[in-house]
Amino acid sequence: NHCYHTAKQNNLTLLFSQTSIGEGSMGGRVYRGHPSKRQVMVESGDGRANRIPSTMARSSRLVCCTQRLPDPFHSSPSGEPFDPTFVLSRSGSNIICSVLFGSRFDYDDERLLTIIHLINDNFQIMSSPWGELYDIFPSLLDWVPGPHQRIFQNFKCLRDLIAHSVHDHQASLDPRSPRDFIHCFLTKMAEKKEDPLSHFHMDTLLMTTHNLLFGGTETVGTTLRHAFLALMKYPKVQAHVQEEIDLVVGRARLPALKDRAAMPYTDAVIHEVQRFADIIPMNLPHRITRDTAFHGFLIPKGTDVITLLNTVHYDPSQFLMPQEFNPEHFLDANQSFKKSPAFMPFLAGRRLCLGESLARMELFLYLTAILQSFSLQPLGAPEDIDLTPLSSGLGNLPRPFQLCLRPR
Ligand code: HEM
């Protein structure tokens, strides 16, 4: 019962409802839009249920070819310090772009750089005190100059960019062989155009593509930056992961997803990073669609519900030392991986993160591929590294940092 905070029609969801269109995301009609998204993701137009997952797996494998790792990860034997934010966003964003738009962008492509800039900027503002203030006093803040004013401009630019791509996709559409998410959605729209209950509309397509792009661009990169900081602060943990990589994978080939089951320590470290970093501390807001009885309370229809994931991830009844970064939280007495019911960075239930499996693949493959070849070195003393977030709102953002890569 410590997980939920409810407030009748408060303004906390305003940013979300104003940056969402039609059935695509938040607001009263949220749930109706959802099946269409999953349906298209799974069917991928040709009815073969494994198509999208295998596309994702392929993309993730590609990323972890050393040629595909962001530049500094294979061209910095000189050990030059760099900030990993941009290179991680650029590489991670390209994975979801290939699913949505059908091909990877060149790393210098203007469209990819624009997408990253717009999403990065919005994630930062929504995670800053400006974003929080806007949620509490929207009518007042509408008149106050500040970075929050950029949220809606950025959102419109991103929507225009997506609309442009959808337009190009319409011209090249061959319903017998859809090439990506947008083609599949357009095919469904055409099939269902006489159905008054259909969820397949242009607005839904634009918003769904936006949500997947937003979810797929910043989350994994932000988690990896938290991971880098923790591994530099605790070099013994980093060394232990590297030992496990050497033992299970060796140096002759790249890590693959099948290795994960044999790498309990690495798995525990990734889980602990996600718990400790708690990158979406208040989850995404939801609105109750009908009167609901919950633990003796009546939650009326129309109430906004904010699930405080933070209280779950830092629950002392679930984790021995919740305030400490400690991979042992996910290991049993035999050093085997131990699940925890209080681990829910992707939430749970019917609305859980649509990108969970992709995100888990990416986190494992990025981290192991990087640590196989490099050690992460901080510029200062490890004990001076501050793991507390720079700001907290929609996301818990790590403090900016630079690191050096030392080839192993
Ligand atoms: C470490 C990485 C990630 C974390 C921690 C994360 C977390 C979350 C959370 C907490 C939610 C809200 C669930 C809810 O409202 O009940 C969510 C929703 C969502 N995520 Fe993720 N996510 C991650 C990666 C991704 C990726 C890679 C994608 C893209 C493929 C993605 C796409 C989405 C979408 C589209 C939604 C909205 C689902 C809906 O409308 O029901 N996420 N995510």
Image (cartoon, rainbow, N blue to C red):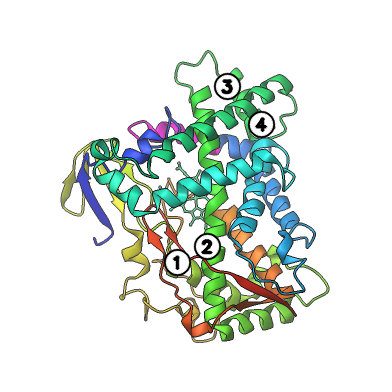
- How far is disc 2 from disc 4 in space, using C-alphas? 32 Å
**Side of 167 where 21 appears, left or right:** left
Between discs 1 and 3, the one toward the N terminus: 3
- Mark 2 and mark 1 residues within 8 Å of each other at the beta carbon: yes
Q: Position of residue 379 (x, y in %)?
A: 59, 78
Between discs 1 and 4, the one toward the N terminus: 4
**Side of 121 where 174 appears, left or right:** right
- How far is disc 2 from disc 3 in space, using C-alphas? 35 Å
Which residue is identified by label 2? 223
Which mark is on residue 45?
4
Q: Does the segment drawn in magenta span residue 365?
A: no
Q: What's the amino acid at mark 1?
A: Ala
Which residue is identified by label 1? 277
Question: Which residue does the image show at 34% across and 40% down from the upper left?
Answer: 145
Between discs 2 and 3, the one toward the N terminus: 3
- How far is disc 1 from disc 4 in space, using C-alphas? 37 Å
Between discs 2 and 4, the one toward the N terminus: 4
Q: Is residue 130 above or below residue 188?
A: below
User: In the picture, which quadrant includes the N terminus?
Assistant: bottom left
Question: Which residue does the image show at 62% across and 58% down from the upper left?
Answer: 88
Q: Secondary structure at mark 3?
A: helix
**Side of 307 where 215 appears, left or right:** right
- How far is disc 3 from disc 4 in space, using C-alphas? 11 Å
Between discs 2 and 1, the one toward the N terminus: 2
Q: What's the amino acid at mark 3?
A: Met
Report which quarter residue 359 is drawn in.
bottom right
**Side of 351 where 337 appears, left or right:** right
Report which quarter residue 291 is drawn in.
top left
Q: Secondary structure at mark 1?
A: helix
Is residue 268 at least partly visible in the picture? no
Between discs 3 and 4, the one toward the N terminus: 4
